[in-house]
Amino acid sequence: MTVSIGSHPIGELHFATSALGTSWYGTRQDEVFETHEAFAGLVASVHETYHLMQDVFVGTCGIAASADDTMAAALQDGVPPERRAERVAFAAMRKRLAREFIETARLSAPLLEQAPLPAALVLPVAQLTPRDLLECHAYLHTELYLAALLTTRKQAFREEIVTDLAGLFRVAELGQYAVPLRLLREMLAFCDFSFANRQHPLYPACEHAAEYTLLAFLLEHALHVPPLDTVRPVHPLAVVAAREDALPVCRFVKLLLALGAEMYDAAHAGRPLLIHPGALRTELLPRMRRRINLGSLLGMAQNAGVRRLPAIKDLLSVEPDQAARKVGLDGAPKTFLSPAEVSGEWLEKFRMMKPGYPYPLTLGVRTRAMQLREAMPDGFFELPPVHFFAAVRLPGFFVAGQHGHMTPPAIVYEGELPVPMELPYELVDEVVARGLAVAAGSLMAGDAAVACPLSGAGLHFLSCPPRTAACSRITRAEALPAHDCRLRRQLARAEHLA
């Protein structure tokens, strides 16, 4: 059972946790974690920072942020009143599509139910959502990061506390979030990872470090999708493949199918496959993408003359060029893009957004992060959380109960929070302003329940005199506090409330 002690709203640049955290992520020699609260705070801060990194490095999270951008733009002061309702309705539709894309399996399930999977896996895989992949990816990196600390700074931890709280970070204990790990093991059952695991430098602090590295790599590339509004030509015979290659769960399954074929071929040819991020990216991923770009999920199996398969080794047994000629796709445009191509499409989108975009600081963070991803393609493995903020020039901030602090490189305040508290920081103001615009638009569009960003989304430590518990779940605009309410003022400017 997964126990959540932190939260990060997708598309935002902050997170909250119910456990006292640490701004140095265990890297300072004077940091020790000898209580349950201290270790839980470390786990929460590491895990939620990886979610924050996903937000600016991974296309799936960019889709959620882009939907919020559309809603915030609809509430700009310069939008003519006669156009505002139309733009809010369009933005609300985009937000619903983004939620469906990330939170549900409705788009991918019909495709995956026909995929060449072992029968016992069809239903669990068809029920997977992109959010499940995001959570598994964050947990994998959290466990790998903590294993590195437990290896290099063993004296800072108490073994019994780490054991007691294993359910907070051990991937194998995560229920639905562990389904991708189960899928990896069952589809690659012919592979013995035990030697690679024992040879990994994080063994025995993480007994499955080699497997987890491989799985985290696959999930990252499954989740890094281009913007949904990108228009590119699609070969008539590649329409189904193009749809699959826009959906993270389908991408993950196709990556596994291609990986299985590569591993099987390598074993028969006596070639070693290095389970290292750099080698995976430069040597294995291009070959896997070449296989994937030959056709659809079902086509990948049909090329080998099979539909339902007892073993992965039977998949894709034909050579890629032969398969391409067989289905007529040898000259077709590719639909499974390289990570650099995906990042390039996001950077082009940000460039087009820049003129007139009302939140330039947040756009700057997202642009710098995607540029960093291009320069450091293995960033999730190479960039520890404590260095992430400096790398993208984001003084991150998070709150734990009534404690809060800014993380490096610009610690503005640390310790017990006075109430009320004002942080003289422009990015905080911009995040709040954008969140208020999105919340106001959602209320105008008739969303079932909206959380004011100053209450339910992790920014409750900021000053808001009229705030009540009801502000974290607003069902109608008229229920907002009558005086000094910033969300009410936002709606009044949009001529939705008097």
Image (spheres, helix red, strand yellow):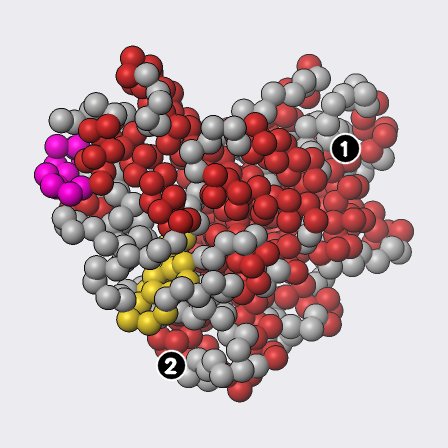
Image location of residue 186, percent across then percent down: 62, 52
**Amino acid type, label 1:** Ala
The quadrant of the rendering that contains the C terminus is top left
In magenta segment, residue 80:
no
Q: Which residues are magenta?
A: 475-485
467 vs 121, nearest the viewer? 467
Residue at 25% x, 25% y is 494
> To which quarter of the image does residue 307 belong?
top right
Q: In this image, 387 relative to 91: left or right?
A: right
Asked whether disc 2 touches disc 1, contact meaning CB atoms under 8 Å apart, the reply is no
> To which quarter of the image does residue 286 belong?
top right
* Residue 304: mark: 1
Residue at 28% x, 71% y is 416
Q: Main secondary structure of the magenta part?
A: loop
Residue at 53% x, 49% y is 54
129 vs 482, nearest the viewer? 482
Which residue is disc 2 drawn over? 35
Image location of residue 184, percent across then percent down: 62, 52
Image location of residue 204, percent across then percent down: 62, 76
